[in-house]
Image (cartoon, rainbow, N blue to C red):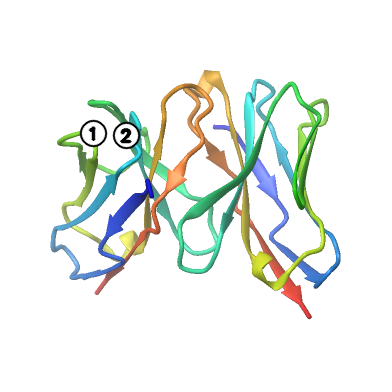
Amino acid sequence: GEDVEQSLFLSVREGDSSVINCTYTDSSSTYLYWYKQEPGAGLQLLTYIFSNMDMKQDQRLTVLLNKKDKHLSLRIADTQTGDSAIYFCAESSRSNDYKLSFGAGTTVTVRA
Amino acid sequence: DAMVIQNPRYQVTQFGKPVTLSCSQTLNHNVMYWYQQKSSQAPKLLFHYYDKDFNNEADTPDNFQSRRPNTSFCFLDIRSPGLGDAAMYLCATSPGTGNEKLFFGSGTQLSVL
């Protein structure tokens, strides 16, 4: 199956920027997503990027896609305590009927 | 607000005792999914419905079944839960148009005693 890998933990000081990285193996990936999961809750879609884009910005969130290296990142500007959560990278492709393949998630801890 | 609702929030069952988890949606989405998520792991797709068409993942155990009586409701049946089936079960929906942005419910945390 498709592999999506993320680093497991990130600790960041409140007010700093967070950068969460993700790599994937499917060169035919069409869409790439970032989901946020707070403790005991379901996953919430934060943002997504189409594979023909390099960057997408949405308020404090910036997504960068390097399709050549199959690398996706999520930058959170001015990180707040409410940003503490698990962040999942996911990809989908037509070859897999657009079913999402998730990474194992990055736990982001924001310290004061 | 349109949403995906899962009931119950927490479910405790006994080893081998059948259990049903439910999911409803007001988004009128074509596709409904069931994921299993164990601690510190990625959600694992069990199966999904595209309208009435059932699609089982190859590695989903036979112990897990699903029903979708109408567009709004989908059920996950675990026929004989084992200790290894204790997990968070997430229901999700998507429009079914290609860019499959999933909308998740809050999940049901299943404990098996």
Q: Chain of mark 2?
A: B
Q: Residue at x 63, y 24 (%)?
A: A30
Q: Is residue A48 left or right of residue B111?
A: right
Q: Hey, what amino acid is under mark 2?
A: Asn
Quadrant location, the C terminus of chain A: bottom right
Residue under label 1: B71
Q: CA distance from mark 2 to mark 1?
A: 7 Å
- Residue B64 in view here: no
Q: Which quadrant of the view contains residue A54?
A: top right
Which x, y percent locates residue B103? 45, 44
Is B98 or B20 nearer to us in this picture? Answer: B98
Which x, y percent locates residue A57? 77, 41
Residue under label 2: B28
Sooner in the amino-acid sequence: mark 2 or mark 1: 2
Packing grade of label 2 (10 A; few <14, some 14-19, many >=20) is: some
Packing grade of label 1 (10 A; few <14, some 14-19, many >=20) is: some
Position of residue B13 relative to residue B46, above or below, is below
Q: Residue at x 32, y 59 (%)?
A: B85
Label 1's element?
Answer: loop
Position of residue A42 relative to residue A5, above or below, is below
Which x, y percent locates residue A52? 74, 21
- Residue A41 in view here: yes
Quadrant location, the N terminus of chain A: top right
Q: Which mark is residue A72?
A: none
Q: Residue at x 53, y 27 (%)?
A: B99
Q: Is residue A89 left or right of residue B110?
A: right
The reply to whether discs 2 and 1 touch (Cβ–Cβ < 8 Å) is yes
Which x, y percent locates residue A13? 83, 73
Outermost residue, right side: A16
